[in-house]
Amino acid sequence: MSIQPKEFIVNKSNLPDSRFVPLRVPEPAELKDGQVLLQIDRFAFTSNNVTYAAFGKAMQYWNFFPAEEGWGNIPVWGFADVLASRADGVNVGERFYGYYPMATHLTVNATRVSDAGFTDGAEHRQAMHGLYNHYVRTTTDPGYTKESEDVQVLLRPLFITSFMIDDFLDDNQFFGAQSVLISSASSKTAYGLAFMLSLRKDKACKVIGLTSAANLEFVRNMGIYDEVISYDQVTTLTASQAVVYVDMAGNGQLRSQLHHHFGDNMKYSCAVGGTHWDELSGASDLPGARPTLFFAPAQIKKRMTDWGPGGVQTRLAHAWQAFMQPVMAAEKPWMQVTHGYGEADVRQVYETMLGGSARPDQGHVLSLCRKLD
């Protein structure tokens, strides 16, 4: 099957406006020293990717894979195969996990090549955190299996964020709060955090999930939140208790409502996601703690110093293994993987996710190159 090189781009100032455009892919003979041509086999699209688009300018997500003026390519996590290489130590046919555009192909400048993988040394990517520029060689990744690729692209990057928020809150003694409020409680990053918090036997904080009425049953059945309420019930929470708010939804109206309800008892407030991408206003001039953006790589950097070489990876690996048990349980798994192929499926998933109508128990893995097994 001949693959027509293409990429999926969105209007930065009007996210529902999207289109596919042809992609210029170099011939193997055109590659410069150090360059590698990758064919993107599969990638995940979750509410986290909507966050990348919603915070594209503020967090520099649009800078990873530049598109034409006014348009952006939303970064995704996935797997790709080497089609051609002019980089020593990176061979044709090898498979790499990492950060990719929503496209059929990507050309990178392979630097810092090691047994573990390589870093894209492209000049336009150097201002961003190195975590996003590293490509992991599947043959040497101890956590990789062919059978778990879908779960890896769907949950691994999200769970790293969940793990680091849990650690950050504990590192700061939960800011003296009695409860942790988590919005968009059915989202994968949210329930990853709730799972981590549920493991704390000495937990001082109650974990309260906030979700839509449609997702109440799903979230309650997970059994990891101490309490689950719908958004229209938030003002029934006791305002005299000290709380921290982890905003996975990016809903400015909800944020304002919670800050005004708890006032000075809002001890910490962070925005992690933007699933309600169209309601991101309302973060300024609020009572209580000033809302901030949570950036997982900053906490990772701190812990790399605190825990020493391999400390983050070891702790994360143990937590990941525990998390996988309920997620992929034989009976009543938290997530079911669905595959999509081609322009129509990619656009449908994007529009569904953007519209906030995606099912919480589904995980979407897509490809513009082939029908997935």
Image (cartoon, rainbow, N blue to C red):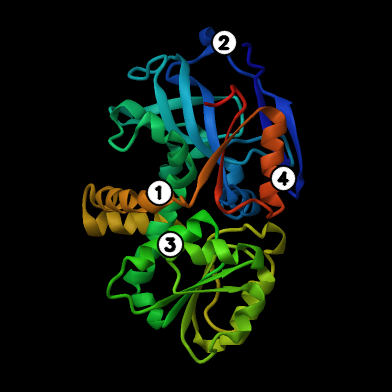
Report how far apart the C-alphas of labels 4 and 2 lie in the structure. Answer: 33 Å
Circle 3: residue type: Leu
Image mark for residue 351: 4
Residue, disc 3: 193
Comes first in the chain, label 2 or label 3 = 2
Query: Marks 3 and 1, Cα distance to the nearest angstrom?
Result: 18 Å
Check whether the beta carbons of the residues at disc 1 and disc 2 lie within 8 A of each other: no
Q: Which of marks 2 and 4 precedes in the sequence?
A: 2
Q: Amino acid at mark 4?
A: Glu
Dot placed on the residue nearer the N-terminal end, 1 or 2: 2
- Specify few, some or many for label 4: CA neighbours under 10 Å numbering under 14, 14-19, or 20 or more: some
Task: Choose between 219 and 332: the one closer to the eye.
Answer: 332
Residue at screen point 41% across, 44% down: 131
Q: Could you tell me residue 222's position as x and y percent?
A: 46, 62
Which residue corresponds to the image point at 26% horizontal and 56% vertical from the top-left?
305
Q: Where's residue 337, x and y in %? A: 53, 40
Of label 3 and label 4, which has the lower sequence position?
3
- The residue nearer to you, when weighing 312 against 361, is 361
The residues tagged by marks 2 and 3 sit, at their Cα atoms, a distance apart of: 44 Å
